[in-house]
Amino acid sequence: MEQTGLERVDAMREYLQEAPEDVRLDVIVERRLGTIRTEFAKAVETPVRKLVGGKTGGMVVIAYLRSSIVTGSHVFCIAYYKGEPFVEEEPERVYLDLRGVFKDAEADCMEMNRILGKKFVRVLDAEKEEIRRWYLHLLYERLGTFTKPKEEECGTAGRIPVLYGGYMETLHRTGWSGGLRING
């Protein structure tokens, strides 16, 4: 018996990961990241600098919100924490609407739907939405690699670490407040 409904989503994900190179998921993700990394870094630079504003110690966290994947709002929370991230109840923070940065990601989703339509009969709207959310989550996760701290910067006075990840999820260091750099 053929799988139906959301039972096919795993097979769809597999198919997208193993598709020919020009339409394979990892190629689509890297191509999109190549176009949004610079815009993203520019968009977060000013809020990070304002939050740091002469402070010493603590850290800045750039966190994507899973709810913004669902709503398509692409809102990120940038917050300054004196202590442990997400433990402080009312940190100084800014919510940044990055719809403009992710505008072309929706076109990628339409392309993936077209690719899936070649293999799967009647791709349901719920399946398309699940694939869209999965794809955007991959973009959000991998976007955090837009900067890397240099070893010689560790412990530099006046620099505050910048961490990236999902809100209330695992974070990793992407740079320092005084020098966000774009890889690539």
Image (cartoon, helix red, strand yellow):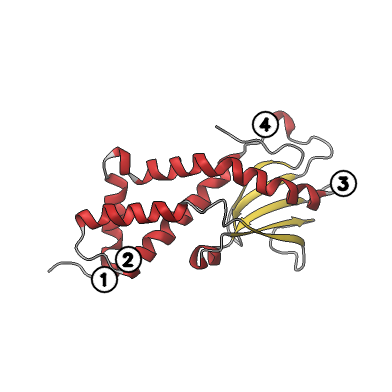
Seen in the picture, residue 103 relative to 72 is either above or below; the reply is above
x and y, in percent, of residue 18 in the image? 27, 45
Question: Residue 66 falls in which quadrant of the image?
Answer: bottom right
Judged left or right of residue 97, residue 157 is right
Q: Residues within 10 Å of mark 2 (few under 14, many from 20)?
A: some
- Nearer the viewer's eye, disc 4 or disc 1? 1
Q: Residues within 10 Å of mark 4 (few under 14, many from 20)?
A: few
Question: Which residue is identified by label 1?
Answer: 5
- Could you give the CA–CA distance between mark 1 and mark 2, rounded to whole angstroms? 7 Å
Question: Which residue is identified by label 4?
Answer: 150
Residue flagged by tag 2: what amino acid is it?
Glu
- Nearer the viewer's eye, disc 4 or disc 3? 3
Q: Name, please, the residue furthest toward the left.
A: 1
Given contact means CB atoms under 8 Å apart, are the residues at marks 3 and 2 in contact?
A: no
Residue flagged by tag 3: what amino acid is it?
Gly
Seen in the picture, residue 78 relative to 18 is either above or below; the reply is below
Can see residue 173? no
Residue flagged by tag 4: what amino acid is it?
Lys
The quarter of the image holding the C terminus is top right
Given contact means CB atoms under 8 Å apart, are the residues at marks 1 and 2 in contact?
A: yes
- Nearer the viewer's eye, disc 2 or disc 4? 2
Judged left or right of residue 44, residue 159 is right
Question: Which residue is identified by label 3?
Answer: 54
Question: Which residue is identified by label 2?
Answer: 127
